[in-house]
Image (spheres, rainbow, N blue to C red):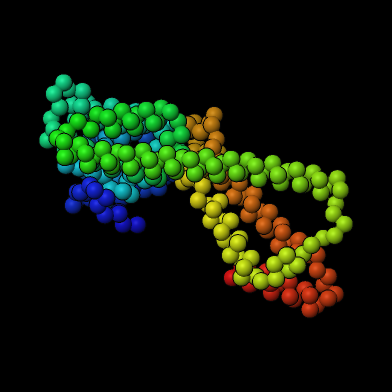
Amino acid sequence: MDPVPDKGVSLLQGGMPQTLSSTSMFTPCGFSPHLHTSKEDEQGGLIFQDGNLTSASLDALIQHLIPTTDYYPEVTYIFTFLLSSRLFIEPHELLSRVCHKCIEQQRLDDPVLDKARIRKFGPKILQLLTEWTETFPYDFQEERMIGHLKDMIHRIAPCDEVGMEIRQQCMNQLLQTLNQKLATLSHGQEGIVKISAAVSDKLVAFKSKPPSIQREILSVCSDPYTLAQQLTHVELERLSHIGPEEFVQAFVHKDPLDGTKTCFSEQKKTSNLEAYVKWFNRLCYLVATEICMVSHKHVACFTTCLMYQSEILH
């Protein structure tokens, strides 16, 4: 996927070499030593082969993520690293190290700040933080993450009056959008808990006292197109709450890397993904049950049921 063009930040024309998949690159100490690389292409602790980043230490990768006054990482690298790095470093620790390096390299602790430098650097670090909050909003449910975010925003605010006003608007927009996103996610998680509890109660009630009359889907909704629309709305709503990091966590727990103790060993946050899987399984069971409930002796009814389910799928 090509990087998204300028969002208020001018990206370098040179671009960023693409990275390989995390499972083939990462080991507990950084990138896999088994990859064939060329030492002649080593640049600042990063090793490239055929223009692709193939090996580096975690510290070098973090440095590669940090923008400067004349450099901004590719969007593809930002996403890949923010997603893969959580296998070996907690998001709050990563953000802390990013902020510390920015403060140190851009001299944001100096009594007298270089306004010209901040005018160039400010929009870039603000853009990086914006991309992080938009792509991985769940990371910012922690107070530590919000603290680092606000501290960095506060440090790049002092500048000339015109620039400060524009930047302040961007900062306010960032925090407002993040708060809205977190509120939506929180509401979605509360909904999952309520639905799970309701389903459990209904299962218990059904087992203790089965209903005297079984209702078929056809009696509830005779139009497969309408039912398909409703199911699509439900599915998209559930999918919207799943963060990309949940897939990484799920796969790591299922098939951990050899000799690797990940940051997820004590903490597993895949509730949205698990809720979607349970919903999808229940839907499959419902379809199978509807088909099995129709007597095969009544060919016309059985055919109608199969055609109905087929039209829903299409």
**Residue 184, can we see it?**
yes
Measured from the top left, where is residue 276 in percent x and y?
A: 59, 50
| Residue 125 visible, this orientation | no
Please state which of residues 113 and 281 is positioned toward the viewer in this rendering: 113
Please state the horizontal and vertical placement of residue 147, each as a whole percent of the image. Answer: 37, 28
Name the image quarter holding the N terminus.
Answer: bottom left
Q: Nearer the viewer, residue 222 or 12?
A: 222
Identify which residue is drawn at 34% across, 41% down: 174
- Judge whether 213 appears above or below 105 on screen: below
Q: Which residue is painted at 17% across and 33% down in the image? A: 159
Question: In the image, what residue occupies the spot 81% across and 45% down?
Answer: 205
Tell me if 185 is positioned left or right of 119 in this view. Answer: right
Which quadrant holds the C terminus? Answer: bottom right
Is residue 123 shown above or below 29?
below
Q: Residue at x 46, y 46 (%)?
A: 244
Q: Is 148 on the left or on the right of 14, as rendered? A: right
